[in-house]
Amino acid sequence: MAQLWGGRFTKETDQLVYNFNASISFDQKFFKQDVEGSKAHVKMLGKSGILTAEEVETILGGLESIYNDVTEGKLEITSEYEDIHSFVEANLIDRIGDTGKKLHTGRSRNDQVALDMRLYVRDEIDETKDIVIELVKVLHKLMKEHINTYMPGFTHLQKAQPVTLAHHLGAYMEMFKRDYKRLLSIRERMNECPLGAGALAGTTYPLDRRYTAELLEFDGPTLNSMDSVSDRDYVIEFLSASALIMMHLSRFSEEIIMWNSNEYKFIELDDAYSTGSSIMPQKKNPDIAELVRGKTGRVYGALTSLLTTMKGIPLAYNKDMQEDKELTFDAIDTVKGCLKLFTGMINTMTVNPDRMKESAAGGFTNATDAADYLVKKGVPFRDAHGIIGRLVLYCIDNSKMLEELTLDEYKSISEVFEDDIYEAISMKTCVEKRNTIGAPGPDAMSEVIAINEKFLEDK
Ligand code: ARG
């Protein structure tokens, strides 16, 4: 047991208590951030005249050698230490002796862990937003390729109106652009440095908190020391943004699974992104999409868990907050992994435009356009709706589609129909005349694609 405390205790910690309390098995994940934070703290102690220049150099040298040895595999982080902070400090003292004992001057593990977590989450936000952009790039490429790939648009999972694949993918494009922007705004809001808050009430040393903040690339120091050590809002915000990313991926996965099914055959997943069955030789399963959909629950779980952990904690630091780590780390690994796999999966899938178009032609997806045709001829919309409803019923009884009816059949229901009805309800018209911004028509689509192009250039 290597602990940073013990002076006021008369008994050894019970082994079970020690194990229950220790966090080294998971907080070693932010070893890099812990060293980075300690280096900034020591530089600030030097600048503020609390440590001599020589002491600062010695401590920095010690911290660097520990960092190098761990990253090169020469020094192992073991459970002999209570947490990552103890590991670094104990090793520092081993290496440089008494000077090492000055590292923790004007600092508490409470502001230290608050800093480490913040640095870690900030790094992960940066990484995650880059991975989101990779997905956005693939969606952008697919949208450009499929402006004229017709497919049915659905409501209630019933065929509604024809759209294009570019338009359908464009919906996800918007979701992932929002996800990206959300990550940026969280990063902006969280970018304040908690170091120097001490245990909860600051310190009597003349710490230059602005300097520490600057060294660690924060916009400035946090403004309340009690909030600094007990704020995990930014973790919750990041988990919430991650939950939204997963929700978007999960909805998309659900569609990929359906589109890849024998019944739809809209797409075929690449062999490299599919798996087989141990018993049924014919199977090629969309396991990746299913796992992404399944793992969404884990990330929701992390968000719910941390919200619940935090809700009853009085100011300031309480040990409950150690529970912020494992689930957050797992959620981060999950969301990054899912984003990468999903991007590879849709980048390699084969689209079947003929099958999509064939499906778009069925299910009376041009019925609204047929009603609009009557409206343009002066029929009030509600009456037009009724007339087309009766025509659809007639079609169902006679196993025909609207475009297959003769003009006589049309006229038997309403005299208003003319020869131009066929053109008005062709799939080409249904899609291509919908050109208000946001709609699937090719002009509107091209405008949106140009906006997305600019988004990718400017981001
Ligand atoms: N392992 C602790 C955590 O994750 C570090 C802070 C410990 N502070 C304390 N007062 N025991 O929250």
Image: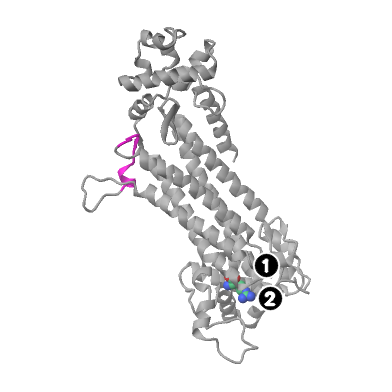
Which residue is more in the foreground, 198 or 393?
393
Viewer-closest of 365 and 106: 365
For the C terminus, give its image quadrant: top right
Q: Is residue 289 above or below residue 403?
A: below
The answer to whether residue 180 is visible is yes
Q: Quadrant of ligand 1?
A: bottom right
Magenta stretch?
Answer: 263-274
Q: Is residue 63 visible?
A: no
Q: Is residue 234 left or right of residue 255?
A: right
Tell me residue 399's x, y (percent): 30, 21
- Seen as rendered, the residue at the extreme bottom is 10
Q: Report the disc number at residue 98.
A: none
For image coordinates 39% across by 44% down, the residue present is 345
- Dot 2, how many residues are within 10 Å of its Cα: few (below 14), some (14-19), or many (20+)? some
**Where is residue 335 drawn, in percent x and y?**
48, 53
Instruction: Give amino acid for label 2.
Output: Glu
> Which residue is at 75% across, 73% downward?
203
Seen in the picture, residue 54 relative to 297 is either above or below; the reply is below
145 versus 459 height, above or below: above
Question: Which of the labelled discs sits on residue 229, or is there none?
Answer: 1
The residue sitting at 68% across, 76% down in the picture is 55
In three-dimensional space, the C-alpha distance between marks 1 and 2, rounded to whole angstroms, equals 27 Å
Answer few, some or many: residues within 10 Å of disc 1's Cα (few below 14, many 20 plus, some between 14 and 19): many
Say whether disc 1 or disc 2 marks the residue closer to the N-terminus: 2
Mark 1 and mark 2 in contact? Answer it, CB < 8 Å.
no
The amino acid at mark 1 is: Val
Disc sitting over residue 55 in the figure: 2
> The residue tagged with tag 2: helix, strand or loop?
helix
**Disc 1 versus disc 2: nearer the observer:** 1
The one nearer the camera, 454 or 381, is 381
